[in-house]
Image: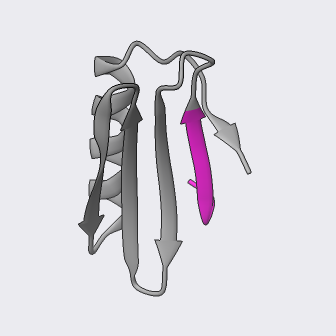
Amino acid sequence: MHAAERITNVNGKNVIVVQAGDEWHVMVEEPGVASKVRTFNTEAYAASYAEGQRIRLHLDKVVHI
């Protein structure tokens, strides 16, 4: 995973992963729902959570930014 990558869809659903120092932040955006941010100490945990959210939101691609 890159320092920042976005798993996104045109329906306004997004899973955004950002590295900040020694932490990884995963933000989940859904229309009509408050954005949620979870913080992880390891990239593997952040990646696993982001992948689970990607599946839950029916997103089909990863875009590296």
Residue 4 inside the magenta-drawn segment: yes
Extent of the magenta region: 1-7
Q: Residue furthest front?
A: 32
Left or right of 56 in this view: 1: right
Q: Residue furthest right?
A: 65
Residue 12 coordinates in the image, percent (x, y)? 53, 25
Residue 41 coordinates in the image, percent (x, y)? 27, 75
Q: Is residue 21 above or below residue 65?
A: below
Choose between 32 and 39: the one closer to the eye: 32
Q: Is residue 41 above or below residue 36?
A: below
Residue 25 inside the magenta-drawn segment: no
Quadrant in the picture for residue 26: bottom left
Left or right of 5 in this view: 53: left
Choose between 21 and 34: the one closer to the eye: 34
Q: Residue at x 63, y 18 (%)?
A: 10
Q: Residue furthest bottom?
A: 21
Choose between 27 and 23: the one closer to the eye: 27
